[in-house]
Amino acid sequence: MKYIIIGTGNISNTYVNALNNLEQHEVVGFVSRSKSHTVNGKTYPTWPNLELVDQDFDAVVVATPNGLHCDGIIAAAQLGKHVLTEKPLGINKVAMHTALDLCHNNQVTLAVAYQHRTSPDNISVKALLERGELGKVFAADLSAKFYRTQAYYDSAEYRGGYAIDGGGPFMQQACHNIDVYTWFFGKPKKVVSLMGTFAHNIEAEDHGAAILQHEDGMIGTIVASTAAQPGFAARLEVHTSKGSFTMVDNRITEWHFEDLPNPANTDFNYAHDGAKSASVSDTSAHEAIILDFEAAIKTGKTPIADGLSTQLTSELILDIYEADMGN
């Protein structure tokens, strides 16, 4: 497949490297928000002029900042091009609905790079939950206590703001982990939250906590931070009527079910945890998302991280912001 990448910041390099590691894939051009780019003697236009790309391509990778994801999805869908967007799907409920409707109407496959869904242990737990083999879940506690320096936030004017980033760690760094939460348990019916800014000079929160109540009575908690030095591995603890399990960085580390074998995959060794840095050197999970995206295009199946399910993740995060009792 031939790809155009919208955005030429750091994350675009991750997709270039991932696509270069896969056979029969080619990046044939870029669209930049700031200036035109020349690659192999060919100049590609500035955003939002995707329709001016003078090149045959099959799909678009949206690698812009959060608040521009839906713009990229809409531009690609209007051209009938399939879309793989960086996470999150979006930071605005109306824009997300518009993007999803346009993809549906134009028969465009849309996937979101929530690559934690490709973890073998996460896939196993998802299947067990869907089959009801773990019993009734009554508690799920997610901790995403990461750390970012002030220099990280100073590296781009939009970082840590609401207009483009969409918020602090809930929307940016911890959204991968929150996506696994919603993938497992769905969207809660009630949210209460508190958050503040403690260690950085930014507009949005750098630490907060939310309590969630689901339709079946399950109580969840989410803590998200970029102020917790030096940065800690993401942790999910789940308690059910039949037992308990713990996951650390998408791996099962504790399993307490008497009659159910531990499905942990000991061969899984994804190197990037995001606790201390946004830099990505291991592109294997991005490669898995790309391959799943292409399989969905070829077979008509739903991608593992499709638009409708990832929309719930963004909506939950927006609900957490709206429920902040400190405002």
Image (spheres, grey):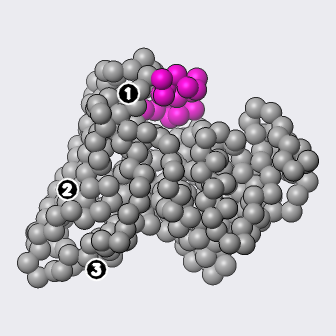
The residue segment tinted magenta is: 151-168
Residue 203 coordinates in the image, percent (x, y): 45, 21
Furthest toward the left, the residue is 258
Q: Which residue is mark 3?
A: 131
Q: Which residue is mark 1?
A: 205
Hey, what amino acid is under mark 2?
Glu
Q: Is residue 272 above or below residue 318?
A: below
Disc 1 marks a residue whose amino acid type is Glu
- Asked if residue 290 is positioned above or below residue 38 in the image, the reply reads below
Marks 3/1: CA distance?
A: 37 Å
Q: Decide which of tag 3 and tag 2 comes sooner along the chain.
A: 3
Q: Earlier in the sequence, mark 2 or mark 1?
A: 1
Near mark 3 (Cα within 10 A), the count class, few <14, some 14-19 or many ≥20, is few
The quarter in which the C terminus is drawn is top left
Q: Residues within 10 Å of mark 2 (few under 14, many from 20)?
A: some
Mark 3 vs mark 2, foreground winner is: 2
Q: Are marks 2 and 1 in contact (CB under 8 Å)?
A: no
Percent position (x, y) of residue 101? 64, 58
Residue 100 showing in the rendered view:
yes
Q: Secondary structure at mark 2?
A: strand
Please give the count of numbered marks on the rendered protein.
Answer: 3
Residue type indicated by callout 3: Arg
